[in-house]
Amino acid sequence: MTAVVVSGLTKVFNQGRGDEVLALSEVDLTVGDGEFVSLIGPSGCGKSTLLRLIADLIEPTAGTVTVADRPAAQARREQEYGIAFQQAGLFEWRTVRRNVELPLELRGVSKAERRAKADRMLELVGLADFAGHYPGQLSGGMQQRVAIARALAVQPPLLLMDEPFGALDEMTRERLQSELLSICAKTGTSTVFVTHSISEAVFLSDRVVVMSARPGRITASIEVKLPSRDEAGRQAPVYFEKITEVRQALRA
Amino acid sequence: MRRVLPPVLFGLLALVLWEVFVTAGRVAPFILPAPSAIGAQIVEQKQNIWDAALASGANALVGLIGGTLLAVLAALAASRSRFLGEVSIPFAAVVNALPIIALAPILNNMFESTSSVPRRLVTGIVVFFPVFLNLLRGLREVSPVHQELMRTYAASGWTFARKVRLPGALPHLFTGLRQASSLAVIAAVVAEYFGGLQDGLGARITSAAAFTAYPRAWAFVAGACLLGLTFYLVTLLLERLATPWKQRLIS
């Protein structure tokens, strides 16, 4: 099974109008099972558009998207993926626990099971003590962790993330990166991760996909094999080599 | 205690100054009666004030509930249909600009003189607009992230309304209700100035004033003030109970 297959994907916004924009042109991308792939590129290169197409939040102009061997629309209806955005997007009238429970609730999971799963996810992101709090009482980093717990709650085979750590400070960001990696490793989740941080992409990914702007297309795909994904990994020579490689690919 | 004490002290001080101003300045009671005289009337007219407040309170409550229910239904409909939404806002703004209380004499002529319906109708119409406009704004303000998330959950339109739109609009509903609760009492009291059944606070105020019994008129005004305050406080209490996530932010 392949987590994501994108082929010949083209997206034109405002087609046939004066402000027509070619956001993506002939994009091919495959994400293997359990693979962690980052999409990186300058703003406006269509990386978020690509993620939204995979999530079936927008429709492609041409080409196909397959998620878990199914058309994207079907995969969305069957909740084959969890998604997290740059904004946590929590429902402020629900407690932290009930926020995490929401996708389970909509799937018709029983109350007891819902609660057990939500609590396990909150424990995973280190927020077990805050289950009864409202989002407004949490810091931005904590809210983002709740959003990730919510994305993971249905234990989806695929995780889609659109700059989820973009609004966080460096310290929180690095801690969440490690948490995310350990969660993905534990659950075997495949991940598509949109970012504009080179170091973040290299540290997290098995593969960094570099995109160029106008029209958005994939210009390079760089395999990363760090000896370990921890502090030592961040200081390994290969880490810096890959950062340089990605940077050069972005400049090209 | 520290939140209650300053306004209470300020109120007492204002009453004392008022008393001194009236007695020392020898202000005629038909211009401004002293608070002590009004207080004496409140004690004397206790039962009458209570009865009249119950009558006005019942009118205000019926109007408030009826107007709110209608406003909620109308806002739900207007938020679902683009056409209704576009038509209703300018329409509501125009009707809201009418002095609705001025409908009272017309409505009074439409019903029996023993009917409470005209006052309740006026109250209901007055209540309708703040609730409708605030709630409609709330129902329309759905964050794009929430919209996309619900789409990824493959949520139906009805689920979306129930889980996101309605709870998200609750604070707006209560903003409207807070305005409406005070307006309801004002409308129920003032509607009586234009005839109809004369058993509420408004009728008592006009008749006392007609008999130049100004302290008594003021005693009923004080009753109306307390009635309005009660409505407002009950609404605040309901708001606290219904939107617990807002309260935890403040405390």
Image (cartoon, coloured by chain):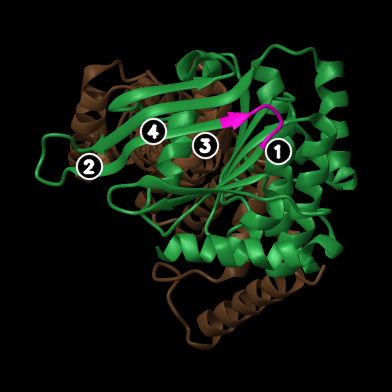
Chain colours: A green, B brown
Q: How many other residues sit within 10 Å of disc 1, few (<14), some (14-19) or many (≥20)? A: few
Residue A106, given in percent of the width and then of the height, sits at 64, 18
Amino acid under disc 4: Thr
Find disc 4 in the rendering and name its residue: B123
Residue at disc 2, secondary structure: helix
Q: Nearer the viewer, mark 1 or mark 4?
A: 1
| x then y, percent, for residue A33 | 68, 27
Q: Which label belongs to residue B93?
A: 2
Viewer-side label of 3, 1: 3
Q: Are marks 3 and 1 in contact (CB under 8 Å)?
A: no
Mark in the foreground, 3 or 4: 3
Q: Which mark is residue B28?
A: none
Q: Which residues are magenta?
A: A31-35
Q: CA distance from mark 3 to mark 1?
A: 24 Å
What secondary structure is the stretch in magenta mostly built from?
loop
**Within 10 angstroms of label 2, few (less than 14), some, or many (20 or more) residues?**
few
**Pointer 3 residue:** B146
